[in-house]
Amino acid sequence: MATHQSNGHSNGKTNGHNKEKSNGHSNGKSTGHVAEPEVDWKFARAKDGVLATTGSKLSIRAIRFKISASVQENGPRPVLPLAHGDPSVFPAFRTAIEAEDAVAASLRTGELNCYPPGVGLPAARSAVAEHLSKDLPYELSADDIFLTAGGTQAIEVIIPVLAQPGANILLPRPGYPNYEARAAFNKLEVRHFDLIPEKGWEIDINSLESIANKNTTAMVIINPNNPCGSVYSYEHLAKVAEVARKLGILVIADEVYGKLVLGSAPFIPMGVFGHIAPVLSIGSLSKSWIVPGWRLGWVAVYDPTKILQETKIAASITNYLNVSTDPATFIQGALPKILENTKEDFFKRIIGLLKESSEICYRDIQENLYISCPHKPEGSMFVMVKLNLHLLEDIHDDIDFCCKLAKEESVILCPGSVLGMENWIRITFAIVPSSLQDGLERIKSFCQRHKKKLINGY
């Protein structure tokens, strides 16, 4: 009996079915399936959602992967990454030893393996407030600082707070696509204002009033600028603040490249004008300390007149963070020492490297007939470059240019269309000079191979 029921079945049944019905049929019939009713899968509607239809078009990472797929495997030359701002892979750009020591010491305390408060550890918030207050005409407190998982999460926090029914936001063109993506995901209408290449990529201030309306809640500025490499003057930022006040909107100031200024023009934090219009500033360790993988950023509330407190914007940020993820607790714990102990020599070294590379980049672009750069980069890690497509054949647009360049020369660039500027490209100079020169030379060779053949072969 034990053997007969070794599979848990009895009475001659196998696999829990009567032999007569082993194929799901009876009376000896083996055909005549009855069609099952089609299921209306409710989640299938997601295929028409923003993430499914346009999400990949609003991501530098997605377009970079698409272009990288064009690179020939086992090619004879190394791939040169000139598309994104992460030079941490190069030993010359290694972060400050003081920052590494602070993280190691924080981890070894054994006291920071816990969940942090949603808004961040009090000591870390106080340290950021003190750090930022050095450049302001007033002092910030810990309550003005919200810690985030990098600058990316800071964007994710701010946009939903502003996304009320019917609202719109003003974004720069070209710009950083994460703002547009987050706006789309939160059904926040986007209206673009242009940056003017011939004026050092300044904001077209005169256009702001014409594109804004009663439902406009905020505008975004990026300074130092990604993707253009510009650094805005005190006078220009003052005009922005005055227009924001006139329109009754807040300013979202993306200042993650604040320490990476290459020229004589100083970085002016938008918070200097907080008494004119309220400002939410985004900062992080990622770019200035060259540690994007540490994922620590912040939102700073520059609001000396307490408008954002009265309108519960600050409270809304707190509420969002209480149901969101947190930056790693031990990185937060290291933040006070990182800010306090990192020597100025580290920033001088990084800026020196970037300045040397930016000079090479601008010079070599000027020597290439097929691309042009209207403004020498003054900050960040990038420069916007126009493709002179009328001089090239078999190149349809900026994405086609980048894909064919990747295939033929193993150089990865960021197409301008993902940044809002078709037939432009963004080049990063945050790479060792020798590799940058090699990459620019490959771009030149590619252009010469694809140049238009004129009459009589010239």
Image (spheres, grey):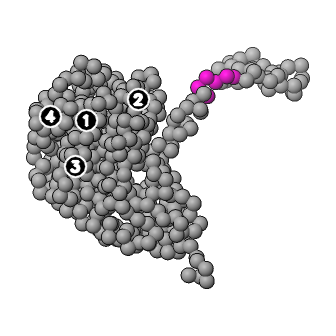
| Tag of residue 242 | 1
**Residue ID at (44%, 22%):** 165
Answer whether residue 42 is magenta in the image: yes
Mark 4 element type: helix
Is residue 288 visible to the viewer in this orientation of the structure?
Answer: no
Which mark lies nearer to you, 3 or 2?
A: 2
- Amino acid at pointer 1: Glu
Q: Residue 177: percent from the left, percent from the top?
A: 42, 43
Which type of secondary structure does the marked residue at label 2 adopt? loop
Q: Quadrant of residue 162?
A: top left
The mark tally for this picture is: 4
The location of residue 30, given as percent across then percent down, is: 87, 27
Q: Earlier in the sequence, mark 4 or mark 2?
A: 4
Which circle's residue, 4 or 1, is located before the other in the chain? 4
Which residue in the structure is indicated by mark 2?
A: 213
Looking at the image, tell me whether mark 3 or mark 1 is earlier in sequence order.
3
User: Which range of residues does the magenta coloring cover?
Assistant: 39-44
Q: CA distance from mark 3 to mark 1?
A: 14 Å
Residue at the extreme top = 11
- The answer to which quarter of the image holds residue 94 is bottom left
CA–CA distance between discs 4 and 1?
25 Å
Disc 3 target residue: 233
How far from the left and from the top, in percent, is residue 209?
Answer: 37, 35
Instruction: Classify residue 45 as left or right of residue 432.
Output: right
Disc 3, disc 2: CB below 8 Å? no
Q: Residue at x 18, y 31 (%)?
A: 275
Residue type, numbered disc 2: Asn
